[in-house]
Amino acid sequence: MNAPVSAIERLQLELPELDWITDPNRIERLSQDFSWFSPVLKRRLEGKVADTVVRPRTEDEIRRLVAACAKLKLPLTIRGSGTGNYGQTTPLAGGVVLDMTGYNAMLWVRPGVARAQAGIRLAEIEKATRPGGQELRCLPSTYRSATLGGLFGGGFGGVGSINHGPLGAPGNVIGLKAMTIEPEPQVVELRGAEALRMHHLWGTNGLVLELEIALAPAQPWLETLATFTGFDAALAFADALARAPGLAKREVAFFASPVPDHLTQLAEHLPRGCHAVLSLVAEAGEEAMNELVAAHGGSVTYRRTAEDVAKSNRTLMEYTWNHTTLHALRVDKGLTYLQTSFTPGEHVRQITELAKRYEGEVLMHAEFLRTMDGLLTCSALQLVRFSTEERLAQIIREHRDYGVRINDPHTFIVEDGKAGGELPEEVVALKRRFDPLALLNPGKLRHWPVRSAP
Amino acid sequence: MNAPVSAIERLQLELPELDWITDPNRIERLSQDFSWFSPVLKRRLEGKVADTVVRPRTEDEIRRLVAACAKLKLPLTIRGSGTGNYGQTTPLAGGVVLDMTGYNAMLWVRPGVARAQAGIRLAEIEKATRPGGQELRCLPSTYRSATLGGLFGGGFGGVGSINHGPLGAPGNVIGLKAMTIEPEPQVVELRGAEALRMHHLWGTNGLVLELEIALAPAQPWLETLATFTGFDAALAFADALARAPGLAKREVAFFASPVPDHLTQLAEHLPRGCHAVLSLVAEAGEEAMNELVAAHGGSVTYRRTAEDVAKSNRTLMEYTWNHTTLHALRVDKGLTYLQTSFTPGEHVRQITELAKRYEGEVLMHAEFLRTMDGLLTCSALQLVRFSTEERLAQIIREHRDYGVRINDPHTFIVEDGKAGGELPEEVVALKRRFDPLALLNPGKLRHWPVRSAP
């Protein structure tokens, strides 16, 4: 009889009742996300893999796992469905990947609020809220598979952010329950601003068990594509539609030519070479929107009512945000992307100038949204024809010099991505409180040591 | 036997089945609105009274009345409940006042849209839409008595405009049915931009029979007052609350001291000398709002849930917009008011500077709303301690010189009020088409002759 040789084996022997994933192919897959959108991350994350993956089903299972990992000083990387793009769920130091998708109960739905376990898929939340006339405020294009905890831990917002801003805008996330990573794990409820200190930190400063989020009243959304022969007319239409306070909407995206040519599943609705605007507008606004399309010389080439969408289970939402990039990568492996925030009020000029400056190399795809301060602007997820890492870094530098913000999607260091610099003191304090042994997702925070699995 | 001596008498003899109001006191009352808020209008409209008032109940009755008036060349002034403030329903040339409040059926409610006859009270629309989870997008503080046609013909927006902008923003009014004023009246459906050419023209360019309007999904609104010791803190809180994209809201109003001291019915919640912010925020946002109040050093002094409001049938909405003025006038007859639009993004500075400049004479009350272009700003309905008409005119002039827009509420000429100048060609074209005999509300359009009742 062989004695256990590694901490991982000891862990598994100690907790045999947990759902351990041992197949190396599955472990490899569950150590990854969509970081392959970036050739830089693809290279840097090559071969980074967990020693094991575990999928707990109850808070008690999570508690036993965490206690044992803390005692054994085993690195713990939390993941949802792995729809992120920054390698945030790839363990740099091996250890345990904690797959939260088995911890997925809807807890309750009330007027304007819902609470669920972190591993629930976003689509499941909407299934629970729609009968009562409510929907998610912000959802990524990956909402079918993405989890609530994953959105909170590594997401930004998405469809709906044109109304409610990023997920991190006060009021969107109301509270959460989190566990400390200690031999005797504590379970703590955080509310409001305090809860947001765990947002977009890739599970480095706490293990989120439950989330309480604000909901929006559901509306019947008309999904349309409007196409234009000119860049300026298409962008002006998108901006006017996004601004119009009398036109309720959930999503407005602008695809400059040749981005639409990459959306092959919609090819019959996107004349080759067109500029296109994808939108979800409340059905009651159709006539007013059509007047606006006509005033800008465009044509509505695709139109599905809310009922059409529900029946077909096909939605244009799955062509927005980073799904645009996904569709484009399917037809052109030579592409990667950028993430750019424009200056509210200057966004149309900035988009126009930058699209022109990098014509043929950086292809403009912009999403309309409100900032944390409620101002209408765009974020772009431009497609980039990749040549070298140096050229990519140069493009990023030039964009920054031009005066727009780049949320670099080619780094796996929290501080170098969207956080854009040092972490606020209160976030660091939360890290110390919830992860005193520095076991969570080691290597993702610049100033914490990477401790490999013992 | 005496032959009829006047056109009015002939009209009444011709249509005996109509509901004629003949009591002189009632005729006098039905010739007025709330223009007594303005000492200027009060003086100028003194003694202006209809020869008769009629209250039709069906489209057919309206048609017969209109046909007969056209044949007899009788001036026709349309009114709802008379909650306007510009004397828009006071007949300058006598004739017939057409009281639309008897023509008040709800026609239908669909997801996001409702259609009703013009004389319906706004509160009745909400009674019909609330069970299905919908509410009005914009409603004046007078919504209990104000009619839909009156809001369209002489109103602006109000509560809800912080989301949907003014009523005139494309998408809020979807269509209408209107009648031409001719011996053979035509009934015409106008949609979208064309329908809006009859908006805020005080019934001078068409008789609106039905309106089709967009609805908002209803939300449970928490009604609160937050009070502050400092002007700047109160205004900063109001602005932050108004902007916050994660805090769903229906109304944010700012009352600088000493405005709250005039709201005597709320006195127990408004410490003497306080600055106050009145808001309707979605209940789900209460915690985030409370954090914002605390961050600005304020206190929540009044709090009613949506259920409290529904049960008591008392709402803070009836202290907003021009109801503030009404409450203040009840305790101080020496007051009148202004209507001011600020520059989006400059509104906090402008409000602060103007409040200081006219301290003690012009008392700041600002309402947050979105512009037609979707930008967040304020409109003020400042209380003015009235001294002379010359001084009032000077204050208005100085505000304009300072760089803010005054929508003069002391005039009964359409072009001199909110329209702010000449009417667009297409509005004039609609006037010619719908009122070829120039019988509608004569004297309110600068360039049309006043034709007195024959």
Image (spheres, coloured by chain):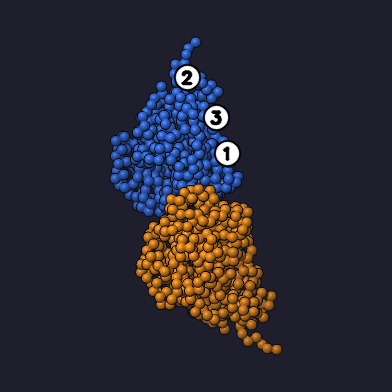
Chain colours: A orange, B blue
- Chain holding disc 1: B
Say which label, 2 or 3, has the lower sequence index. Answer: 2
**Image height check: is A319 above or below B179?**
below
Say which label, 1 or 2, has the lower sequence index. Answer: 2
Which image quarter holds the C terminus of chain A? bottom right
Question: Which residue of the protein is positioned furthest toward the bottom in this rendering?
Answer: A1
Q: Which residue is mark 2?
A: B9
For discs 3 and 1, the disc positioned in front in the rendered view = 3
> Residue A195 placed where, x, y %?
52, 64
Q: Which mark is residue B60?
A: 3
Q: Which residue is mark 1?
A: B107
> Residue B35 placed where, x, y %?
41, 33
Q: Residue at x 48, y 69 (%)?
A: A427
- Chain holding disc 2: B
Residue A453 visible in rendering: yes
For discs 2 and 3, the disc positioned in front in the rendered view = 3
Task: Give amino acid for label 2.
Answer: Glu
Task: Give amino acid for label 1.
Answer: Leu
CA neighbours of label 3 inside 10 A, class few (<14), some (14 to 19), many (20+) = few
Distance from disc 1 to disc 2, alpha carbons, whole Å, reads 34 Å
In the figure, residue B38 lies in which quadrant? Answer: top left
